Image (cartoon, helix red, strand yellow):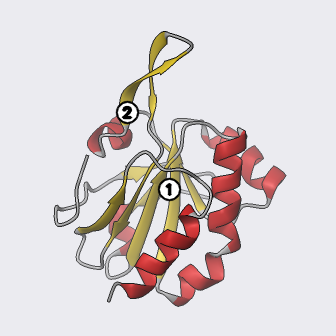
C-alpha cells in the first residue's frame, strides 16, 4: 500500500461516465477512495458523504474518484439511485492490486479476498500526501476534505 511520500500508482480504468485516467488530472489534487461494493450501506454512505462535499473539493482543486470491482453498469445504477456526483471507476484488478487494497478478509470465520476500504490523497506532483487504510466511514469524507484543503 503506497504511503505518504511515495509516488502514486498511475491508472486507467473504465468509469460509468467515461474512461478515467490518473494522467487526465495532472496538476490537480486527487482523492482516490476504494470501497468494497456498490449499494451496500457503508459504501453508499461513503459515496454520499464525498458527493455532498463535491463543491468544496472542487474549490480545493481536488478530484474525487471512487473505485471498486463492480461493473460500469453497476456504478451507473449506484450513481442514479443515490445521486452520487463523484467519479466511479470499475477495476478489473490491476488498480486495487497496485494500491495494495486487494486483501484477505474474514467474515464469520470464512476467509475471502476483497477490497479494504482505503483512501489516498495524491498531490499535484503525483505523490501520495496522505493515506487512510481501514477507513471507518463516519466523518471520513470531512477529514479527507480538510487534508485536501491544507495541501498546497
Q: Secondary structure at mark 2?
A: strand
**Residue extending furthest left?**
6
Residue count near mark 1 (Cα–Cα under 10 Å), binned few <14, some 14–19, many ≥20: some
Q: Is residue 33 left or right of residue 87?
A: left
Q: Residue at x 31, y 37 (%)?
A: 97
Residue under label 1: 19
Q: Is residue 80 left or right of residue 111?
A: right
Q: Residue at x 60, y 84 (%)?
A: 56
Q: Is residue 107 above or below residue 134?
A: above
The CA distance from mark 2 to mark 1 is 22 Å
* Tags 2 and 1 touching, CB below 8 Å: no
User: In terms of image quadrants, where is residue 10?
Assistant: bottom left
- Checking the image for residue 102, the label placed there is 2
Q: Name which of mark 2 and mark 1 comes first in the sequence.
A: 1
Q: Secondary structure at mark 1?
A: loop
Q: Is residue 46 left or right of residue 150?
A: right
User: In terms of image quadrants, where is residue 79?
Assistant: bottom right
Residue 18 x, y percent position in the rendering: 57, 57
Residue 90 x, y percent position in the rendering: 52, 43
**Residue extending furthest right?**
81
Q: Is residue 28 above or below residue 59?
A: above
Q: Residue at x 59, y 64 (%)?
A: 139
Mark 2 vs mark 1, foreground winner is 2
Amino acid at each position: 500500500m503506497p504511503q505518504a511520500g511515495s509516488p502514486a500508482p498511475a491508472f486507467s480504468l473504465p468509469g460509468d461516465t467515461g474512461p478515467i485516467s490518473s494522467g487526465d488530472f495532472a496538476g490537480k489534487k486527487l482523492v482516490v477512495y476504494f470501497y468494497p461494493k456498490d449499494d451496500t450501506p457503508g459504501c453508499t454512505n461513503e459515496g454520499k458523504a464525498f458527493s455532498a462535499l463535491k463543491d468544496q473539493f472542487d474549490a480545493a482543486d481536488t478530484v474525487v474518484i471512487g473505485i471498486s470491482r463492480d461493473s460500469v453498469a453497476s456504478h451507473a445504477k449506484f450513481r442514479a439511485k443515490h445521486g452520487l456526483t463523484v467519479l466511479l471507476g470499475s477495476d478489473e484488478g490491476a488498480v486495487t492490486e497496485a494500491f495494495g487494497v486487494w486483501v484477505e478478509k474474514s467474515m464469520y470465520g470464512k476467509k475471502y479476498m476483497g477490497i479494504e476500504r482505503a483512501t489516498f490523497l495524491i498531490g499535484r506532483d503525483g505523490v501520495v500526501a496522505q493515506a487512510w487504510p481501514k477507513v471507518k466511514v463516519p466523518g471520513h469524507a470531512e477529514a479527507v476534505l480538510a487534508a485536501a484543503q491544507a495541501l498546497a
